[in-house]
Image (spheres, grey):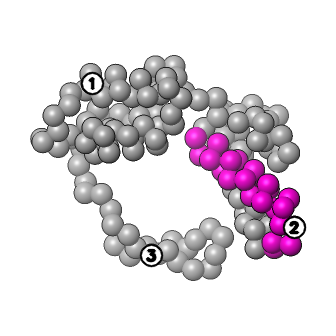
Amino acid sequence: MVNKMARMHARKRGKASSTRPYRNQAPEWLSHDKKFINKKVEELRRKGLSTSMIGVILRDQYGIPNVREVLGTKMSHIVKELNLEPKYPEDMVNLVKKASNLRKHLEENKKDLHSRRGLQLIESKIRRLVKYYKKKGIFPPEWKYDPQTAGLLL
């Protein structure tokens, strides 16, 4: 499949990559049942791991290729049912961490203009996400991204 979508912050197009085979049910070689997977997801989430980390652990340590194929629902829905969802969405947390690390780098290296541009791009993604989450009702309408205090919030 040829990827015709252009990148967000570049004029280039992305490279085509491999895709997962289409499946809507668990593979027949899988030895773990749904109760075990639900229990593991709950246990790992209670330890404070993100849903993506839980997926990586289940794949690497337990041989579960995709939780959604086995359980029929996304891991975020399972976490929501268990009332263990994080205060802020995972994609927002990752972007804010990336921006705060870059901000620390720029304090030490004031003339690094390429990183300064990268910080601008990351913060524009954060603002776009905030707008989306306000529209969806996940963030309150008066919530604002403040770069100086963002690292403390998360």
Residue drawn where x is 30% and y is 40% of the image: 61
Q: Nearer the viewer, mark 1 or mark 3?
A: 1
| Residue with the most extreme front position | 108
CB within 8 Å, label 3 to label 2: no
Label 2: which residue?
110
Regarding residue 130, the answer to whether it shows in the image is yes
Q: Which mark is residue 15?
A: 3
Amino acid type, mark 3: Lys
Q: Residue at x 46, y 19 (%)?
A: 82
Q: Which mark is residue 26?
A: none
Tell me whether circle 1 and circle 2 mark residues in contact (CB < 8 Å): no
Q: What kind of element bears circle 1?
A: helix
Q: Nearer the viewer, mark 3 or mark 2?
A: 2
Q: Amino acid at mark 1?
A: Phe
130 on left or right of 66:
right
Q: Position of residue 12 (x, y in %)?
A: 57, 80
Residue 36: mark:
1
CA distance separating discs 3 and 2: 33 Å
Which residues fall within the magenta stretch? Answer: 90-113
Callout 2 secondary element: loop
Q: Nearer the viewer, residue 92 or 127?
A: 92
Percent x, y for residue 85? 54, 27
Q: Residues within 10 Å of mark 1 (few under 14, many from 20)?
A: few
Amino acid type, residue under disc 2 in the picture: Lys
Q: Earlier in the sequence, mark 1 or mark 3?
A: 3
**Cα distance in 3D space between marks 1 and 2:** 51 Å
